[in-house]
Amino acid sequence: MVIIMVLKPVFFADLMFLELWPSLLWALAIGYCATYQCLKGYVLLLLLAVIPVVAGGIYFGMSHASDDSFLLAGVIPWSDASMHFRQAAQMMLYGVTQTGMNGRFLYPAFFSSLLEISSGHLLLAQGLCGLLFAGALVVALRETARSLGAYGAGIVGFVCWLFFRERCSGLVMTENLGLLCGMLSLGAFLMALRKRAFALLLLAIFMLALGLCARPGALLVLPLLMLFAGWFGWQDWQTCGNKHLPWSLRGFLGAALAVLVIITAFSCNTLLSRALYEGKVIANQNFAFTLNGLLTQGKWSDCLGWSHWNARRVMQENIRLIEEKPLRLVSGALRAYQEAAAHRTLFQFHHESRPANLLLFMAIYGLIALSKKPEMRPYALWMSLMTLGILLSIPFAPPWDAAERPFAATVPFQGLLAGIGGAFLVKQLVVIATQFLSGKISTQSVALLARIFHTDCNEETAQADGVPPSSAVDEYELFGRAERKYDVFVMKALCLLIFFLTVPWPLLHGKIVTSMPYCKPKSILRAGSFITVTPENRLELESRMEPFFRNYPSEAWLLDKFPSPFILGIDWKNKNLDRAILGCDAQETFSFRGWQVDIRFAPQN
């Protein structure tokens, strides 16, 4: 795979993004490397995690592929992505934004920090986001491998990569921050339960709440996690070192601290909206439209014609509909569950539906394994509550509105559930195989199977041949005391970095920029946000734009009218950072069909 990446990078990127088998091979490799907890294993795991990020950079940065809804030619954000990019770029240039969009400012603030670091280079900022994805994936997989072995970790990596490939890579969308926070939260949860550390549990809840605030979706997991924090505090209170507190007080304090960190996470969005947005935020705007679609057996956009984006008017109509017939909520919820089951929403990522049925089956078996397998008991209550929260949230993030996108922050947990089921299914097969082949295979092969599938089925055979038991291997070969220390450090450092890029940095940058005199950008174009269309590359680029043109045929008609060569890009002189069609050395533009067009392309009449 690495050789193909070096010799034929575009072919390699196409394989990673258009085919399934390279992703499966990558998932198996990264899952196996996750079981090696030494420093060399850490480095190899990070290198493997970077491979899909490199593929994304090639796919969108070199071959200029397009998304069917949110990206044109690899460099022009479209629809919702263009609004998020405008927010982030305005924050970077002016310290504030005039674009309210949907009232969610965490991701635009986060991406404005990446744009600032990359000096406005859009592709480089996307690359930095990809590197953070790789780091968060390493944290999540190392912790998963401790509990489920290579196969379980590989499934989690496979699910996270499929979602990142289809919904995040190359796109300026809120799902990026939701997925990042979700992966770090998964690692923190697993570490907290393994170490019985309440402080890590609070960190996990905070990161998940931050991700759900950035990309709302399965919000009903949060109240259930408050209850879990209370139960965890009642069971084992170690943050204050005082186990003599009454059990009721321990439980209450645990739940209260969970409520506090969730409120803190959601307050970050409020803080950013007040400091960086020049306008008034309408609370729960998207929820009003979504609820109306649920109540009227339609979609969120059906009410736009009569409401003209007036969320308050839509919410008043929703209340009237509920008072008139309360069972509308029940019928709408049943419809949402039917759609989710028919389309396997939790495991079908955009157009990639091939592994959805298998992943769903493994997730169902994972739920069974949580209650049946003794080694899963420490995670049973937590994962059961997470699953319940995700399922209860489906009617309020219905599949007909945004498919699986709202579940960005909980995708790693969905992958973990599938990983639990898959790991135990394969483990049972390994038990049968090793019993059948007992005495016919070497002890090294037995030990290798134990590492990959995290099974103790060959404990007696291994000890009879002088191989240390799995507990000894876990303690000295795999887990090691030094490795535990830097695992915790890396996870906390990544959580702190993402929080710093999301909240403190944009606030500080906004204060500095707004206190300085306004300086208009000198050039229309910036590196990383434009592409030159020439007679030589035009056919190839148009073939890469085909998915986009299927949804936007009028744009195909428009671009066909311009003779090569011309430049597609973003007009950085325009305060709205509109998309642009320019000639060489363009100085002036005029507005035409949503584009800023070089004045020299204007019709003579």
Image (cartoon, helix red, strand yellow):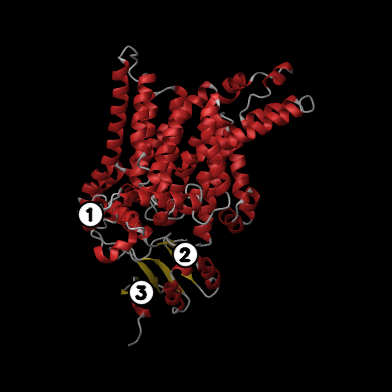
Residue 141, horizontal then vertical, whole percent: 52, 36
- Mark 2 Cα shell of 10 Å, populated few (<14), some (14-19), many (≥20): many
Whichever of labels 2 and 1 marks the residue nearer the N terminus, that label is: 2
Seen from this angle, which residue lies furthest right? 440
- Location of the C terminus (image quadrant): bottom left
x 44%, y 52%: residue: 126
Q: Is residue 391 visible?
A: yes
Secondary structure beneath label 1: helix
Secondary structure beneath label 2: loop
Q: Give the residue number, with chain letter if any, for mark 2.
A: 73
Numbered label attached to residue 597: 3
Q: Is residue 294 above or below residue 460?
A: below
Q: In the depicted view, which residue is nearer to us: 601 or 499?
A: 499
- Tell me the distance, in whole angstroms, between the alpha carbons under discs 2 and 1: 45 Å
Q: Is residue 43 visible?
A: no
- Mark 1 Cα shell of 10 Å, populated few (<14), some (14-19), many (≥20): few
Q: Which of marks 3 and 1 is in front?
A: 1
* Cβ atoms under marks 2 and 1 closer than 8 Å: no
Q: Which amino acid does label 1 sit on?
A: Arg
Numbered label attached to residue 320: 1
- Mark 3 Cα shell of 10 Å, populated few (<14), some (14-19), many (≥20): many
Whichever of labels 2 and 3 marks the residue nearer the N terminus, that label is: 2
Q: What residue type is labelled 3?
A: Val
